[in-house]
Image: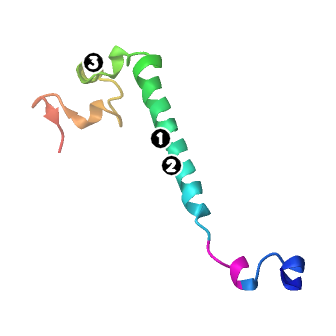
Amino acid sequence: ASVYRLQFHESFAEMNRRSNEWKTVMGGVFFCFGITALLIWWQRVYVFPEKPITLTDEWKAKQLQRILDMKGNPVQGLASRWDYDKKEWKK
């Protein structure tokens, strides 16, 4: 063993060499992403309740028709853009 190795454990070239630690870090990051994705999927399937009926397209269509039948907000709102004679949206 040289005196240099006793004082300095690595040479300058050995100290500045590239390491592969970034591969381990990226592997850990992607592993955590995967666990998080599985957790979110599990919650959507088993934890969250069913969507309410008011979010279905059929319900929204009935609600829109009810607003138009009641002539809701006829000055500047929804009913002002509906042509009641032709039964279609104004162009």
- Labels 3, 2: front one: 2
C-alpha separation, residue under disc 2 versus residue under disc 1? 6 Å
Between 90 and 54, the one lying in front of the other is 54
Answer whether residue 89 is magenta in the image. no
Which residue: 57% across, 49% down? 28
- Which one is earlier in the sequence, the residue at label 1 or at label 3? 1
Q: Which mark is residue 9?
A: none
Between 29 and 8, the one lying in front of the other is 8
Between 7 and 81, the one lying in front of the other is 7
Residue at numbered disc 1: 34
C-alpha separation, residue under disc 3 versus residue under disc 2? 41 Å
Q: Are marks 1 and 3 in contact (CB under 8 Å)?
A: no
Which residue: 35% across, 17% down? 54
- Quadrant holding the N terminus: bottom right
Q: Which mark is residue 30?
A: 2
Residue neighbourhood size for the residue with mark 2, other residues' Cα within 10 Å, grouped as few (<14), some (14–19), many (≥20): few
Circle 3 SS class? helix
> In the drawing, does residue 11 fall left or right of residue 32?
right
**Magenta span:** 13-18
Q: Quadrant of residue 55?
A: top left
Which residue: 35% across, 37% down? 76
Please tell me whether residue 34 is drawn above or below residue 60 in the rendered image: below
- Structure colour scheme: rainbow
Circle 2 SS class? helix
Q: Quadrant of residue 50?
A: top left
> In the drawing, does residue 62 fall left or right of residue 45?
left
- The amino acid type, in three-letter code, at marker 1 is Gly
Q: Are marks 2 and 1 in contact (CB under 8 Å)?
A: yes
